[in-house]
Image (tube, helix red, strand yellow):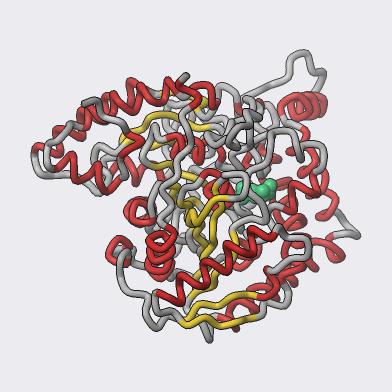
Amino acid sequence: MSLDPASLTIASARDGLKAKQFSAAELAEAAIGAMQAARPLNAVLVETPDRARADAKRADQRLAKGEAGALEGIPLAIKDLFCTEGVETTAGSKILKGFKPTYESTVTANLWREGAVMLGKVNMDEFAMGSSNETSAYGNVENPWRRPGDNRPLVPGGSSGGSAAAVSAGFCLGATGTDTGGSIRQPAGFTGIVGLKPTYGRCSRWGIVAFASSLDQAGPMTRSVRDAAIMLGAMAGFDPKDSTSVDLPVPNYEASVGQSVKGLRIGVPKEYRLDGMPAEIETLWQQGIAWLKEAGCEIVDVSLPHTKYALPAYYIVAPAEASSNLARYDGVRFGHRAAGAKGINELYAKTRGEGFGPEVRRRVLIGTYVLSAGYYDAYYIKAQQVRTLILRDFEKVFGEVDALLAPTAPSAAFPIGDKADDPISMYLNDVFTVPVNLAGLPGMSVPAGLSADGLPLGLQLIGKAFDEATLFRVGAAVEKAANFTARPKPWWRA
Ligand code: GLN
């Protein structure tokens, strides 16, 4: 029988490799074949089959010697925001076309140290700015899911849409994502997989192309909660090269999966109940509450009164930091350089005008505006003050509860093009995810059900700072109760 990576999880592949049911080389070959068969999804920007074969060979040797790491022989896809030594890293932008980093990000280095196999670099919104993957300079990623009886292509969510599509389509067993305002959780929700944004400082940001440095955080995207725990254990840890990474031991996250949730107090924030929210999102949320009650949790109604200011504050802070971070793309040091410019100012202007897409230009303009003299106090300082109030809301509530339960996004995946001309309606898709980034807390999306249109919907769990362990515990309980076994039909193989 041929090996199908879509039928495996990281945990089951780990067992299969140890029991010698298949080798890492066989698994890599199957994953490479499945990745190439999935090209119609446009999820992968750079396929690295030779690298995957070399990694798998080394994994088989380490397995044979009994020296296997936590991810030995596991094929992963890497979001193109992570610098990978010698492998083109574009952040989904034309301006970085051809950029081959001379160094490896700490998170990916940690994954290779644990024996993971790199299949390729995956597509994303340009510089991680977007919620649908439509801002990529390299074309849309298509969601592996389609509405039954409707062939219209759907967005996979964003910005980690290539990662989400890769895991959901099943050609890799896990993928890295990054989440600045929801970019792991929302695409996980849209594709029926698990996505976890860790606490700010849990994973090193070193070697990850910066979007908004005070919000960015890397995390795992997988097909099960257990797999997310295994993968986060490998990714996380203190890194002296990132001054915001935190020197705390990395717990055995996998040990939390399957632990009883009896007696845990779960908060339900009333401000997440929005006017005009589709009834099926509310129904799913109520279902989640019922599942956790049945599992022995105590449900507590809580209030996070400043929630309504989170989205506007985010869309000031994130562009402000982006405009500063993206100043480095000047045509001199990295990637694209405009031809025929007269003088340095024209070189900057032409390079940036040619290299950045419309959404990135919009963010740089907004960010520069809110940081400029006269507006700094009115916008940026105000947004930072709001951020403190949002954090205080969460801190107060976490005096009473162990975790919060909310929807991941206010909708299921939407058709490509539906929101492309309306940035505000696109930004509204982040309404449930951005408060978590502003407060620096961990959040996880777990697939919980199907919409009336037959598309996946996620439930979000929000935890205390550095308490990812409780999220794995509660997430596994939701996963078990939801028993979400639906899979996209592999139309791309036809
Ligand atoms: N959709 C949000 C934005 O466009 C979040 C992106 C992210 O988390 N990287 O900014």
Which residue of the protein is positioned furthest toward the top in this rendering?
340
Q: Quarter of the image holding residue 470? A: bottom left
Q: Quarter of the image holding residue 134? A: top right
Q: Quadrant of the N terminus?
A: top left
**Left or right of 137, for residue 20:** left
Q: Residue at x 43, y 70 (%)?
A: 467
Percent coordinates x, y for residue 88 in the rendering? 50, 26
Q: Nearer the viewer, residue 369 or 147?
A: 147
**Left or right of 467, for residue 212:** right
Q: Is residue 134 above or below residue 259?
A: above
Q: Nearer the viewer, residue 436 or 207?
A: 436
Q: Is residue 57 above or below residue 201?
A: above
Q: Residue at x 66, y 27 (%)?
A: 137
Q: Quarter of the image holding residue 233? A: bottom left
Percent coordinates x, y for residue 113 in the rendering? 28, 43
Is any part of residue 333 visible from this angle?
no
Which residue of the protein is positioned furthest toward the bottom in this rendering?
400
